[in-house]
Image (spheres, grey):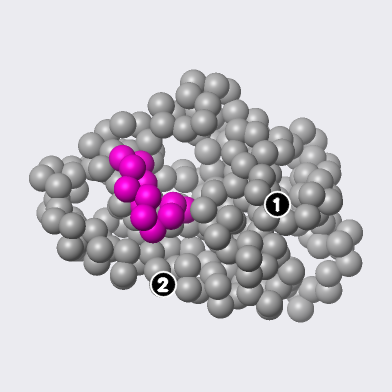
Amino acid sequence: MKLPLLLSVPHAGLRVPDEVRGYCRLSADEIREDGDEGAAEIYALADHVQRFETTDIARAIVDLNRAPDDRRADGVVKTHTCWQVPVYEPTPPETLFADLLERHYHPYHARLSGHAGHVPIGIDCHTMAASGPPIGPDPGAERPWLCLSNGDGTCPDAWLASLATCLEAAFEHPVARNDPFQGGYITRSHAAEMPWMQLEFSRAPFLSNPEKRTRLLAGLRDWVQRQGWDPG
């Protein structure tokens, strides 16, 4: 039986697309550090949920959780990573950036939109640095183990509180709500189609990634049961 949820994992990828490979100056470690380390392992739940989306494209190249016109240094197509490391030398022509969006960004969001109406909620799944990076809402601050967010009213507060309770039981640890994150572009932009919330795991080694996955699945199962949603 699969849980009636959509899980989106937009930052687990490590691949640099061929069209910008000759411009990208990042090392493999820098690409990994800019993305959601551990996300591919923690959120390996495609066989347990009704709907699942992810990508192999690195966040440092195309950030699916940014607005398509966000051209900040850490925007949709970046000039610098969240650790302020330059991404390109030389900078690719604007036509290549537009091609990245056409090939990788817009199809992902179209797939998310296609799931609307088929499950009660989408959860945008991330990992976060154990302390805030230079570009972020909390530079240098120690972060909680888990953070759930719906800061723009992207899902009912009661749903977020219920999932927080279930995850607190599964992890035997408090779950932060809307701090340090309040939800990103995916949750905000797709909430008009269906309810969404964002989930962030700290990359601190308080548990192994396989154990984080096991406890997350237990918490999600408990939550679906409490919500009265029938697995399919």
Q: Is residue 216 magenta?
A: no
Q: Which residue appears at 10% of the width and 45% of the height?
A: 90
Q: Dot 2 surroundings within 10 Å: few (below 14), some, or many (20 or more)?
A: few
**Mark 2 or mark 1: which is in front?**
1
Q: For the magenta stretch, what is the residue range?
A: 65-76
Q: Dot 1 surroundings within 10 Å: few (below 14), some, or many (20 or more)?
A: some
Q: Which residue appears at 40% of the width and 69% of the height?
A: 106
Whether residues under marks 2 and 1 lie with C-beta atoms below 8 angstroms apart, the answer is: no
Label annotation for residue 107: 2
Please tell me which of labels 2 and 1 falls first in the chain: 2
The Cα atoms of the two marked residues, 2 and 1, are separated by 25 Å
- Compared to 55, does 35 lie above or below? above
Asked if residue 212 can be seen in this view, the reply is no
Q: Is residue 134 left or right of residue 176?
A: left
Amino acid type for the residue under numbered disc 2? Pro
- Return the residue nearer the eye: 43 or 71: 71
x, y percentage for residue 177?
Answer: 71, 38
Q: Secondary structure at mark 2?
A: helix
- Return the residue nearer the eye: 179 or 222: 179
The N terminus, quarter of image: bottom right
The C terminus, quarter of image: bottom right
